[in-house]
Amino acid sequence: MLPWPCEPTPPTRREQILKEAARLFAERGFHGVGVDEIGAAVGISGPGLYRHFPGKDAMLAELLVGISGRLLTGGKRRVAEADGDPEAVLDSLIEGHIDFAIDDRPLITLHDRELDRLRDSDRKLVRQLQRQYVELWVEVVRQVYPGLPEPTARSAVHSVFGLLNSTPHLGRRGRCRGGGATAELLHRMARGAFGAAG
Amino acid sequence: MLPWPCEPTPPTRREQILKEAARLFAERGFHGVGVDEIGAAVGISGPGLYRHFPGKDAMLAELLVGISGRLLTGGKRRVAEADGDPEAVLDSLIEGHIDFAIDDRPLITLHDRELDRLRDSDRKLVRQLQRQYVELWVEVVRQVYPGLPEPTARSAVHSVFGLLNSTPHLGRRGRCRGGGATAELLHRMARGAFGAAG
DNA sequence: TCACCTTGTTAATGAGCGTTAACGCATTTC
DNA sequence: GAAATGCGTTAACGCTCATTAACAAGGTGA
């Protein structure tokens, strides 16, 4: 039936496909990669993908909706958990975003690059999730820096996203060893950028 | 017949094409826009473009080589001019990059997004120009923050590029009025980020 | 053993698109 | 004035590529 209610199990075929599709889309763009390549990346051939997805668009849609939703829910969770000290909440948000940007570089790349290839309804949904995520940050930032006008805070948040999402351009040192160093550097720079904005 | 026979020579057809192609490529991706659309954007139709460019690839190549070259020469000029005070040089580099990111948002978007659609020779050239530009920054940053190891400085530079290149995500307020405000905010945040890295 | 569902395969279809061909028409040049 | 050149046009070609059709094999349950 529906592949939803099960989570543990080794990576299902659907998940393999999504992972490889994310990598390929990030590398060569949505239109730059064909279904045959995606199929080959998971050991099946072209049209076999249609047993798991209604179409190529659906893969991109699921990837983008998935990442936007996970970012938002993760952010909400962190805000709820560390409720009280705004500084701690902001640090937690930054940490969560960095973890995501380091673990899922392809998705981070896709997330602000291939949004316009979605069907209207999906694009609207993704944009709504992204906006809520930004507003979450804006609120917290304005609590830490009360003097900051809202438009300025929003610009600052977008800019810090640009900073944090630069992980795909950074060397791959983050993966093998000392990944914590890259994460810590990004964290410090984000805080420095916010501090200079306020 | 020409509406501007006066001093600044009206934009030649080639320039119109490049400008519109940059905008369209940035909006929908290189593979997402057809030659007919580019032609329509400048008032001619599809194949008419081939009187000005040998092909669609050539437009992208000229755009990317152009922007990389201009960034590099502009950076070199600023380093040469304000020679002496590293702080002033860094501020000048930041200012130049921001001017560019605000004036030519489409090109900034393209520049780190569609590199892989180029022929090998062009891609190699663009990458070389980009690397030189990064090294220019790394040197200056290490003069301002002497304790910073080179790999860390390089990561910091890439991240600040991510921050400065976020202009396409910022509201269009930068254009109409108070554009200086956005530029100044980005400048402060960049300095703050570097400061926190060092 | 016999359906039957799942998950593949390869071949065919049909649309989109970059590119080229063939032609028209000002304007310039000899 | 005729030829050449610059700059367009529309029509056609050919290739790529997402999608569908038709078919096959392994596993499961009655």
Image (tube, coloured by chain):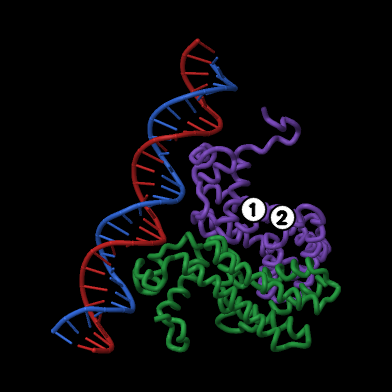
Chain colours: A green, B purple, C blue, D red
Image: A179 above or below A124: below
Single out the mark in the foreground, 2 or 1: 2
Query: Where is residue B7, by image quadrant?
Result: top right
**With A150 as the anchor, is C8 left or right in this view?**
left
**With A155 as the anchor, is A26 left or right in this view?**
left
Tag of residue B126? none
- Quadrant location of the N terminus of chain B in the rendered image: top right
Image: A99 above or below A36: below
Residue occupied by mark 2 = B100
For this rendering, which residue is in front, A189 or A86? A86
Residue at point 64%, 54% (across, down): B106
- State the image coordinates of residue B169 (x, y, percent, origin top left): 68, 62
Q: Which chain is home to disc 2?
A: B
- State the image coordinates of residue B108 (x, y, percent, origin top left): 65, 57
- Quadrant location of the C terminus of chain B in the rendered image: bottom right
Decide: marks 2, 1 in contact (CB < 8 A)?
yes
Residue at point 54%, 75% (across, down): A66
For this rendering, which residue is in front, A187 or A48? A48
The secondary element bearing badge 1 is classed as: helix
Can residue B198 be seen here? The reply is no
Residue occupied by mark 1 = B67
Q: Which chain is home to disc 1?
A: B
Q: How many marks?
A: 2
Image: A183 above or below B22: below
- State the image coordinates of residue B63 (x, y, percent, origin top left): 60, 50
**With B83 as the anchor, is A135 left or right in this view?**
left
User: How would you rate the neighbour count of disc 1 (Cα within 10 Å): few for under 14, some for 14-19, many for 20 or more?
Assistant: many
Q: Looking at numbered disc 2 in the image, what kind of residue is underneath it?
A: Phe
